[in-house]
């Protein structure tokens, strides 16, 4: 007679057999297809992850804008493919999407991370950004001379010794700081890291007098300088960060192509004009105060409420519908049909 196996052994046997069946294809077949530049061109699209902030990507009156967004579009045009953007603010999620072939490029600051370092490659930098100190001017700043003002304000890193400086979670410095201090020119500067807060909110805290000092990426500081006239952004700190993009380590052809494009593109007038548009343009600084700037309450146009109702009926995201209308008519009610006018 055959000996009947106990129930628990039958269960273990079945479970092991199922695992073998599930795992077998990965042992017999070739490794997963590596998505490099040829596959991107074959698919006809470049998928990029970008952050939603006042520089990289935002919506203004229904129109997608941003320094990183326009850089990505120029690179996609160079490859002769369309650009598809994923808006993700968590760099860990962005890295997971990249490694799992859910995107091709990450166009946002990503700190050094031992867990992912062997899976990713960083491109050549397309810019270097210095950090500036943000501090309040005295109440009577407009009545005193520049010399007197400079004697009151902190003008070099030595004067920060023993003082606390705040940084937002968006700063790449957030992930480089150990034991709540950073060494700058031999001076230990105490840093308080504030999670889940952006540069604008941090600068607003200085403006309200709730904190005394903050560090800001110079690109950000230039934008907000005109919005906060009672704040000083003129003290440069010997701290820099490089701006680059990230691709998978097993996409070497994409990396090589990207690096060659960056080296050529940053020398062009088109790049210089793009840089001026977002970082040296007073008109853009004024946009930051506009109620239809997406980061000021997620408003896009005067038709937002109507668009939300219509989108519910269609089952669409109302922002997508607003963007489509903007592309067609820029919310001009005099335009009808496919670009025609009444």
Image (cartoon, rainbow, N blue to C red):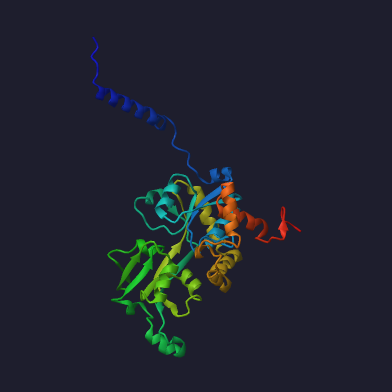
For the C terminus, the quadrant is: bottom right
Q: Residue at x 57, y 68 (%)?
A: 277
Hey, which quadrant is residue 146 in on the image? bottom left
Hey, which quadrant is residue 29 in on the image? top left
x and y percent of residue 200 in the render? 45, 68
Q: Is residue 270 left or right of residue 179?
A: right
Relative to 208, residue 331 above or below: above
Residue 236 can be seen in this image: no
Relative to 45, residue 263 above or below: below
x and y percent of residue 51 in the render? 47, 58
Q: Residue at x 48, y 46 (%)?
A: 102
Q: Is residue 329 left or right of residue 40?
A: right
Relative to 294, residue 102 above or below: above
x and y percent of residue 156 in the render? 37, 79
Residue 223 can be seen in this image: yes
Q: How many marks?
A: 0
Query: What is the residue that sits farthest to the top in this orientation?
Result: 1
Q: Is residue 27 left or right of residue 42?
A: left
Q: Residue at x 44, y 78 (%)?
A: 231
Between 47 and 246, the one nearer to me in the picture: 47
For the N terminus, the quadrant is: top left
Between 124 and 308, the one nearer to me in the picture: 308
x and y percent of residue 203 in the render? 42, 72
């Amino acid at each position: 007679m055959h000996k009947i196996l106990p129930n628990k052994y039958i269960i273990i046997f079945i479970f092991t057999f199922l695992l073998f069946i599930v795992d077998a294809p990965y042992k017999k077949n070739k490794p997963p297809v590596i998505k490099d530049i040829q596959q991107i061109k074959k698919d006809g699209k470049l998928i990029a992850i970008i952050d939603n902030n006042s520089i990289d990507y935002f919506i203004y009156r229904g129109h997608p804008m941003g320094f990183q967004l326009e850089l990505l579009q120029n690179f996609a045009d160079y490859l002769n493919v369309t650009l598809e953007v994923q808006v993700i603010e968590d760099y860990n999620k962005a890295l997971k999407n990249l490694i799992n072939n859910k995107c091709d490029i990450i166009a946002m600051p990503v700190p050094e991370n031992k867990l992912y370092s062997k899976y990713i490659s960083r491109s050549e930098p397309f810019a270097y950004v210095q950090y500036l100190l943000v501090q309040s001017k005295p109440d009577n700043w407009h009545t005193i001379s520049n010399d007197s003002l400079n004697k009151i304000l902190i003008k070099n890193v030595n004067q920060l010794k023993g003082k606390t400086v705040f940084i937002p979670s968006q700063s790449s410095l957030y992930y480089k700081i150990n034991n709540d201090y950073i060494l700058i020119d031999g001076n230990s500067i105490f840093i308080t890291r504030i999670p889940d807060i952006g540069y604008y909110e941090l600068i607003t805290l200085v403006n309200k007098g709730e904190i005394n000092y903050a560090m800001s990426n110079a690109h950000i500081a230039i934008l907000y300088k005109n919005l906060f006239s009672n704040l000083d952004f003129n003290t440069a700190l010997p701290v820099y960060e490089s701006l680059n993009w990230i691709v998978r380590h097993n996409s070497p052809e994409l990396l090589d192509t990207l690096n060659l494009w960056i080296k050529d593109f940053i020398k062009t007038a088109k790049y210089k004009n793009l840089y001026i548009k977002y970082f040296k343009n007073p008109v853009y600084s004024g946009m930051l105060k506009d109620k239809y700037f997406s980061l000021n309450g997620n408003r896009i146009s005067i038709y937002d409420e109507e668009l939300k109702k219509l989108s519910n009926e269609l089952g669409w995201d109302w922002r997508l519908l607003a963007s489509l209308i903007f592309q067609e008519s820029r919310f001009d009610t005099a335009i009808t049909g496919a670009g025609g006018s009444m």
